[in-house]
Structure formats: structure tokens, C-alpha cells
């Protein structure tokens, strides 16, 4: 199955004819389209179930992801609903799905090649265990990344094996049920294929293999043509074994005239199998957490990193007041945070990170904070910030409160790498004296905080402790859903300059922020109306000045068009314009990769210097991507002198674009996008917040599996430079402080990769599902050039319990129910059942999936759990699931409809036959 990055499938020019990778819904079958079809279907089912359970109607206004999110979140809460997090979640899954073809191109088990059935299923089971454990620990990004890889392997089974040639139309459930054996596998000495001289025979599986229902898969040789005698090949130009008798191949990756029916059957089975796996995860973790994993949540995540040393009493009181105000004022709206995160830091301690979706719990936790300790000024600020950046969802807004410089300034490069990797925005509220100087090279200064804030697109606000309550309005502004940045610029040294920016009709709550000292400015509207810095309340907006911050809130009736702000100061300053709108974009810098299934992969570090920069953009409009058109995309420097480099765009459909910028600006740059909103016929402008730059250094590293507690994990990595060779320093950090060893220096030769190995040992008591973020950096001896890679891996306890809970129906009392349903109102029926988990880990959760009655259970800690269900005779079907402590799922179903069969507890299967897309054609 040919894979790619992003929601769209890319147009990739290969040696020879052009191969079109078209978007989801455009008629092509790829890993991404199969995965997308299954994900959108399962998310829709889950959203509908959650809405109906809450008594709401689920009515999407269209088929775009934005409209799906709006229907899922919007029935009761007012405000803007952005689809950005859902798009990002989908893209993370698609990205990891595609990377299997780059990172594990020669691994038989990752693709079910070369009859590696047991090994392939082992990868699926290991991955499913990790996904469920990650979700339990609320490590949703790790779960998404593993899900993408697992789905790729599962889908490859149907294209690379002879499953559909054997006549099977339903998925092979045994692949996700390790308690069921893989049966009738062809052994290594059994011939399986006949020779196909043309290489494109309709079906070269031997008749006896078909008759005996033997399961086989094609051998794939990228570096060698060797294969066992008589075995099938995968086929295709990249498979060297396909020229060895028996020639040809049985892969159904591409639709051709000779394999049309088999290709379509494989697509259908792979889609259905993906739905099965997603349903199993959904039942194991519950609907709400399944939707959180998929990014279906209000956009706002409130994350506070708070200094708790002795001088911070006033600051803590203000942070507490802000949290209370956010909770109380935004409850019931789309601006109500979907999650609250709190990270305290002191000296020498920092953490723990506290995260919750319960606002009352957040109130309790922040009320416990007290100021104590410290005394030597520098504190462990960056250590606390590192916890927040690795624990909070990507693109979060993080607010740091401190009155001291950073003692752990050595983490600065790691923090920059994490900011770029997560695209999170960090704002600092600094209440200390700016005249404090660093006591040593190991201590930081407030200038470091300003640098980090600018790198992330955040604010560095310096005020007195008395002024702090006025400055925290910034948090209320930015802890909102659908927040977008229109423009951000910085000047150091300051100078007089006019900055134009474009406001569109969709923008609401438009706010302009200027930080700096000795600032004078004049704001001018498209109609030519002006307001100066001296007018606190004027025709265009209200101006609030506190410390080094000027906050201008525009009036709601201001018109769309090109605005200008002239700023005059000889001191450094920053400008930022934000608002709320569902018109936005997400992006990744990507690089192409070759091989049998080429594609694009998202970069973990900085793009390569001396090469064009390539970006993948996903666009979102008010009514989906079709409601906007793009004028141009460019890279622009934030700090002057301003440099703009326009990109060449390739429209991939469905709002997805491939952008190539031949000449990348020097220094730090961001992405700027301009276009037209068709709904209002007004032009819009959006800017990314995270700054990026290029590097001549490249680091390659791949995490291939989860890690067991107490077991040493070896991670090979390679470093190369296109710049000057010589000694490069290597530094690595993980956010769990697990013991690590690695070479601290590598000698590099220009243009050649140097290999090395890192070892990491999670302690034996590490909880299963723990997510670890690892940052590796390589820096030249001069310190002029460096790059990084950010990796995630999960610590998962080895699973030995694969048996589902069992259900025994003891009694069903339904004799009172009338045959005439119009008379059912006054009558009830009852079911009693025993639930057990045998010698397994024990049942953790029992929940009602279907039926409007009342389900109760005895203690879940008992060996045998009694379930009692009572319902009106008008509600004739009941289904509840039992989930054990490692995520094995059972389903208990019973109907009092006369034609129904006996109750059973089995894996819940979706009605996949209704979901197959028969028109899917060409590649997958």
C-alpha cells in the first residue's frame, strides 16, 4: 500500500511517468485514504453516540472535518469552533502511517511480507497495548503516532497476502485477537505461486494453496533477490525477487487491469479491518477519551508553569484568581478550556505536572500552591517549562509566572527544540527586577525568557507585582478556542516603522499587543481613521498600558481591509495581532523519501540549508476548505530587516497544499498565508507563530517499538553535516530523567553520516503507558550550527493477558412485555448476568453501550461480578461492555425481540459491510 504524509496524497514526480496521489474522497485508495475513511466514520459514530447520550441532536452541516467537529462540540456551547486540533490529530496518524514505508522499508513484519504473519501480528498487538496504555495516561499524541503505524501494518496484510485470493471478504479478526490462533499458514518449504513471465498475471497462487486455504504472502527483496523455492514475490520494480522464478508478484497495492477485483477486495477488507481495530480501542477507552485522542475537543488548553519560591506569594494569588476567572466566565462556552495543566517549580525541585479536564479539580490544585524556599534568585524555570512542553498537547498556550532568572539555562536549546516540535506558544509574566545580572554563565537572564517567548510567538511581559493583575488579561484573551495570529514582528534595535496587516470579516475579538519601552504608535483603519497611543479610548479601540505591555482591543464594529500601525521607539519592541476565527491553517516542513513506496515525511528538526524548503499545509475555512481560496504562501522573517520569500504551491485538493520555497530567508522565519474567504468575499491573512531556521546538520533516528520497564533500550542514531567537518558535541535529554548514555562528541566528515548508539533504561517501576519525550542535539564546535531531533516512545509493561472477559446470562424476565409495542409504556423487563475475567488482570470497567435502562454491578474487585439491567419494554435491546485492566474488551448483547439469539460476550464488530467504499480505485 503506497503511503504518504498528510490528509492529502501528494503529487510526486518520479523517474518516469508521473504518479498521481489524489486526496481522500477523490477516488484513489491509499493507506491515507483507507485510514481517513475509517477514522472519519468511527469519529462520526462516536460523536453521534455522545450527542445522543447527552440528549442532543447530531447534525453536521457538511462532510468536512471542520463541520464534523462543530456538530460534535457545538450543540450546547456558544462560540467559535475550530477544526485545527482534529486536523492535527489526523495528520499525526497519517504521518506515522506513511513513515512505516520509510523507516521500516526492509522489515518483513511491518508489511506482512515474506510470510512474517506471527511477527506482524505481534507488532499489531504490541501497538494496541501501547495505544490503550497511553490513553489511560492521557498521552494522546503517543497513542496517535502508534495508531498510525499499527494501521499501516494491519492494512498491508490484505494487500500483501493472499487473503482475498482465498475468497475471504471479511477481515481476519485473529490479527487483533491474540487469543485466537493464526491458522493454516504455509510453511517455508511449501511452494505457493506459479511462474508469471509477464509479471502481471491475474492470480498466480497455486491451485492447491487456494483449495487448502493456505495463507501466504509475497517475498520482498529490496537489497537481495533471494527467496525460498517456489514462493510468491511481492512484485513491482522495487522487488528484486520478482525476477526470480516464480516470477511476478501478488501485491495488490496498485489497481491494474489484471487485478481490479482483487485490489478492490483488498481495499474493502483493509477498510473494514481498520474499523474493527478502531472500535476495539474505542470500547477499551470509552467514547470521551477516544474523541480526545482524535483531537475532538475545544481548542483551548490552559497550562500554567508557576514559580513557588518565597517571593512569589502575590504572583501565585494572581495566577489563582485568573484560573478561577477563566473557569467561571467561560463555563458552557466553546472557550471553556478542554484541559487544565499546572506545573510548579522551585529550587531544586520542579513538578509534578498536574493535568485534568475537571475545572473543580484545577481549582483545588492551584489553591494548594504556597510560596516557600528559594532565596538565591535563579530557579528551575526551564525544567518546569520542559515538563509543560512535553506533557501539554501540541499547539498549547503556556503561561509562565516567575520573578527570577533561570538556574537551568543549559536547557535553553532543548526548550527551543520542543517549542519548534510542538508549535506551542509560551508567554512569560516576569515580576522581578530587570537589573538583576546573571551570577554565572550557568544562570540565565530575563533576556533569555524574551528570546524564548519570541521564538514561540508568545509574549514576554515585565511588570511589577502590583501591576500583574492588569497584565493577566492577556491570558483571558488567548485561552480561547479558534485563536489565530494575523501578524507578529520584532525589532531589535527599535526603529520607526509602519506595519500593514489585513483583517477579514470572520475575525472577532481582535487584539493588538506591543511590548517594549518608550513606545509611541498610531493605528490607522482602512477608512483612514487614526488613533494614537495617547488616546486610551478612541474611535478604533481601547488601549491598556501595564509595565512593558500595550494592549489594544479593537471595537467590534471595525471594518475588514488593510490596517496600518506605525511604531516609533529606539528600544527593542514586538508587535502581535490576534483574533478568533475558524479560518486557519496547520503545516509541517517535510522532506521526500525514495523507495518502493515513496512519499514525504515531516521533519523533526530544522530544514536543511542550501536546499529548497518544502511545506505541507492543511487549510481550514468556515465551511470547510472549499470556502476559501489561497492567494500566496511565503516565509517571512519576524525580526528586521524583513525578508519575504514566496512559495510555489501545488493544490492537492481538500484544502491541502504542497509548498516549495526555493530561497529560504536568513535567520528565523515564520509562515504567512493570504487568501480570500468566499463566505464574506473578504481577503484574510494568517501567520504561524513558531519561528524556524535552517541548518547544515542533520540527525536521523527512529524509535521502532515501545520499551519495557527495567529493560535497557538501544537507540541507533546518525549525524551528518553539509558544512565544515570536525568535532560536534552531542547532547540528549528526556523529560522523565531516565538514565541515559551516549557519546558526547562525534567526529563528522562533510557529506557522510556518522553512526552512534544511545541507551536509555526506564526504571522497573515506571507505570505502563508512560510517554517519554527525547531530544537529541548535535552542535558544531564553534556553536554556529546545530540541529535536533525530538522523539517519543512509550514504556509499556509486557502484556500476558489476552483473554476477553466472559459473560453468562443467568436470567431474563420479559414475560410481562406486550407484543404490541404501542402498549409497552407501563411494563419493564430485567436481565441478570455474571461477568468474569478468569485468570486475567480483572475487570476494570463495565459500561452501557445500547439501551435506555439502568445497569448496575456488584463490586468490580470480586472474582464474579453480577450485572443487573432493568429497562422499559419499549427499549428491547441491551448491550454493555466489560473492559479488563489491560484493555481487552468483551461485549454483552441481548434482545427481547422474539427473533433474537442468545446473549454473548464477544468483541464488538462494526457493521462494516455498510461502510465499504466500492468506488475506491488505483493505488493503496
Image (cartoon, helix red, strand yellow):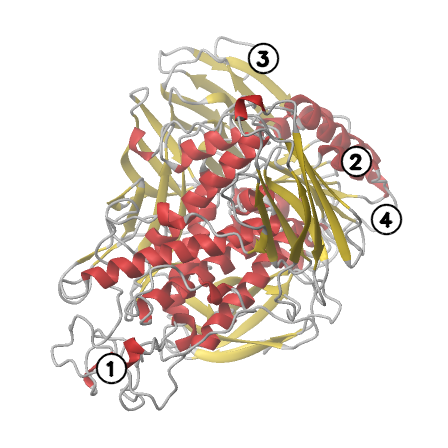
Residue assigned mark 3: 536
What is the quadrant of the C terminus in the image?
bottom left
- Would you say the residues marked 1 and 2 are in contact, meaning their CB atoms lie under 8 Å apart? no
Left or right of 592? Residue 871 is right
Instruction: Pinpoint residue 593: horizontal percent, then vertical percent.
Output: 32, 66
How far separated are the C-alphas under marks 3 and 2? 29 Å
Secondary structure at badge 1 equals loop
Instruction: Pinpoint residue 231: horizontal percent, then vertical percent.
Output: 28, 85
Q: Residue at x 75, y 39 (%)?
A: 432
Residue assigned mark 4: 375
Left or right of 546? Residue 171 is left
Number of other residues with Cα within 10 Å of mark 3, as a class: few under 14, some 14 to 19, many 20 or more: few
Residue assigned mark 2: 316
Residue assigned mark 1: 193
Q: In the depicted view, which residue is nearer to us: 720 or 433?
A: 720
Q: Earlier in the sequence, mark 3 or mark 2?
A: 2
Q: Earlier in the sequence, mark 1 or mark 4?
A: 1
Amino acid at each position: 500500500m503506497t503511503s504518504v504524509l498528510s490528509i492529502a496524497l501528494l503529487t510526486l514526480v518520479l523517474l518516469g511517468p508521473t504518479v498521481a496521489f489524489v486526496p481522500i474522497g477523490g477516488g484513489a485508495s491509499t493507506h491515507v485514504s483507507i485510514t481517513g475513511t475509517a477514522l472519519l466514520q468511527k469519529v462520526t459514530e462516536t460523536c453521534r453516540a455522545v450527542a445522543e447520550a447527552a440528549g442532543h441532536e447530531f447534525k453536521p452541516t457538511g462532510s468536512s472535518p471542520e463541520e464534523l467537529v462543530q456538530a460534535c462540540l457545538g450543540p450546547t456551547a456558544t462560540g467559535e469552533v475550530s477544526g485545527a486540533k482534529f486536523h492535527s490529530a489526523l495528520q499525526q496518524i497519517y504521518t506515522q502511517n506513511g513513515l512505516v514505508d520509510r523507516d521500516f522499508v526492509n522489515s518483513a513484519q511491518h508489511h506482512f511480507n515474506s510470510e512474517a504473519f506471527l511477527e506482524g501480528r505481534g507488532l499489531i498487538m504490541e501497538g494496541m497495548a501501547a495505544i490503550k496504555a497511553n490513553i489511560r495516561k492521557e498521552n494522546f499524541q503517543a497513542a496517535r503516532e502508534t495508531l498510525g503505524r499499527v494501521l499501516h501494518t494491519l492494512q498491508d496484510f490484505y494487500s500483501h497476502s493472499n487473503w482475498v485470493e482465498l475468497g475471504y471478504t471479511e477481515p481476519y479478526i485473529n490479527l487483533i485477537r491474540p487469543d485466537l490462533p493464526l491458522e493454516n499458514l504455509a510453511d517455508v518449504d511449501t511452494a505457493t505461486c506459479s511462474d508469471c513471465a509477464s509479471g502481471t498475471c491475474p492470480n498466480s497462487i497455486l491451485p492447491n494453496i487456494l483449495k487448502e486455504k493456505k495463507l501466504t504472502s509475497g517475498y520482498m527483496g529490496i537489497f537481495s533477490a533471494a527467496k525460498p523455492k517456489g514462493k510468491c514475490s511481492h512484485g513491482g520494480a522495487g522487488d528484486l525477487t520478482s525476477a526470480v522464478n516464480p516470477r511476478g508478484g501478488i501485491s495488490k497495492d496498485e489497481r491494474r487491469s489484471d487485478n481490479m477485483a482483487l485490489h478492490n477486495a483488498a481495499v474493502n477488507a483493509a477498510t473494514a479491518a481498520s474499523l474493527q481495530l478502531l472500535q476495539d480501542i474505542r470500547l477499551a477507552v470509552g467514547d470521551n477519551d477516544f474523541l480526545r485522542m482524535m483531537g475532538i475537543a475545544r481548542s483551548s488548553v490552559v497550562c500554567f508553569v508557576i514559580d513557588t519560591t518565597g517571593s512569589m506569594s502575590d504572583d501565585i494569588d494572581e495566577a489563582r484568581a485568573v484560573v478561577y476567572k477563566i473557569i467561571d466566565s467561560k463555563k458552557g462556552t466553546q472557550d471553556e478550556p478542554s484541559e487544565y495543566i499546572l506545573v510548579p517549580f522551585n529550587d531544586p525541585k520542579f513538578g509534578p505536572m498536574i493535568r485534568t479536564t475537571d475545572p473543580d479539580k484545577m481549582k483545588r490544585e492551584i489553591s494548594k500552591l504556597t510560596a516557600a524556599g528559594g532565596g538565591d534568585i535563579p530557579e528551575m524555570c526551564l525544567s518546569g517549562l520542559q515538563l509543560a512542553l512535553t506533557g501539554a498537547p501540541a499547539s498549547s498556550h503556556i503561561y509562565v509566572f516567575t520573578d527570577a532568572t533561570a538556574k537551568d539555562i543549559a536547557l535553553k536549546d532543548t526548550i527551543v527544540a520542543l517549542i519548534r516540535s510542538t508549535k506551542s506558544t509560551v508567554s512569560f509574566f516576569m515580576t522581578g527586577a530587570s537589573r538583576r545580572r546573571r551570577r554565572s554563565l550557568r544562570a540565565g537572564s530575563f533576556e533569555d525568557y524574551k528570546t524564548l517567548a519570541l521564538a514561540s510567538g508568545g509574549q514576554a511581559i515585565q511588570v511589577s507585582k502590583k501591576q500583574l493583575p492588569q497584565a493577566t488579561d492577556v491570558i483571558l484573551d488567548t485561552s480561547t478556542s479558534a485563536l489565530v495570529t494575523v501578524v507578529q514582528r520584532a525589532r531589535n534595535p527599535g526603529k520607526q516603522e509602519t506595519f500593514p496587516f489585513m483583517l477579514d470579516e470572520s475575525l472577532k475579538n481582535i487584539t493588538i499587543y506591543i511590548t517594549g519601552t518608550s513606545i509611541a504608535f498610531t493605528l490607522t483603519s482602512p477608512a483612514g481613521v487614526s488613533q494614537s497611543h495617547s488616546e486610551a479610548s478612541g474611535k478604533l479601540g481601547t488601549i491598556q498600558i501595564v509595565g512593558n505591555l500595550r494592549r489594544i482591543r479593537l471595537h467590534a464594529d471595525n471594518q475588514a481591509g488593510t490596517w496600518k500601525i506605525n511604531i516609533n521607539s529606539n528600544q527593542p519592541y514586538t508587535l502581535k495581532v490576534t483574533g478568533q476565527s475558524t479560518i486557519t491553517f496547520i503545516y509541517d516542513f517535510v522532506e521526500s523519501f525514495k523507495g518502493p513506496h515513496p512519499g514525504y515525511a515531516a521533519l523533526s528538526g530544522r530544514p536543511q540549508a542550501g536546499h529548497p524548503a518544502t511545506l505541507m499545509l492543511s487549510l481550514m475555512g468556515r465551511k470547510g476548505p472549499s470556502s476559501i481560496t489561497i492567494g500566496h504562501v511565503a516565509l517571512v522573517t519576524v525580526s528586521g530587516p524583513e525578508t519575504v520569500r514566496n512559495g510555489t504551491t501545488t493544490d492537492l485538493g481538500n484544502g491541502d497544499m504542497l509548498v516549495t520555497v526555493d530561497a529560504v530567508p536568513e535567520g528565523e522565519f515564520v509562515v504567512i498565508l493570504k487568501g480570500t474567504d468566499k463566505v464574506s468575499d473578504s481577503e484574510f491573512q494568517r501567520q504561524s507563530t513558531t519561528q524556524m531556521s535552517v541548518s547544515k546538520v542533520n540527525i536521523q533516528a527512529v524509535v521502532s517499538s515501545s520499551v519495557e520497564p527495567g529493560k535497557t533500550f538501544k537507540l541507533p542514531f546518525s549525524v551528518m553535516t553539509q558544512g565544515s567537518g570536525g568535532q560536534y558535541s552531542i547532547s540528549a535529554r528526556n523529560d522523565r530523567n531516565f538514565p541515559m548514555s551516549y557519546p558526547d562528541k562525534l567526529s563528522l566528515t562533510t557529506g557522510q553520516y556518522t553512526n552512534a548508539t544511545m541507551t536509555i533504561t526506564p526504571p522497573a517501576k515506571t507505570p505502563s503507558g508512560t510517554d517519554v519525550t527525547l531530544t537529541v542535539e548535535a552542535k558544531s564546535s564553534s556553536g554556529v550550527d546545530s540541529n535536533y531531533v525530538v522523539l517519543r516512545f512509550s514504556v509499556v509493561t509486557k502484556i500476558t493477558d489476552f483473554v476477553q472477559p466472559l459473560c453468562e446470562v443467568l436470567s431474563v424476565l420479559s414475560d410481562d412485555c406486550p407484543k404490541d409495542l404501542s402498549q409497552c409504556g407501563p411494563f419493564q423487563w430485567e436481565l441478570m448476568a455474571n461477568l468474569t475475567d478468569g485468570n486475567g488482570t480483572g475487570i476494570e470497567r463495565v459500561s452501557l453501550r445500547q439501551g435506555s435502562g439502568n445497569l448496575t454491578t456488584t463490586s468490580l474487585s470480586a472474582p464474579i461480578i453480577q450485572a443487573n439491567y432493568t429497562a422499559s419494554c419499549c427499549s428491547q435491546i441491551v448491550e454493555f461492555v466489560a473492559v479488563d485492566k489491560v484493555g481487552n474488551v468483551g461485549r454483552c448483547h441481548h434482545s427481547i425481540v422474539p427473533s433474537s439469539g442468545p446473549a454473548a460476550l464477544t468483541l464488538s464488530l462494526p457493521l462494516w459491510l455498510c461502510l465499504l467504499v466500492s468506488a475506491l480505485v488505483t493505488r493503496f
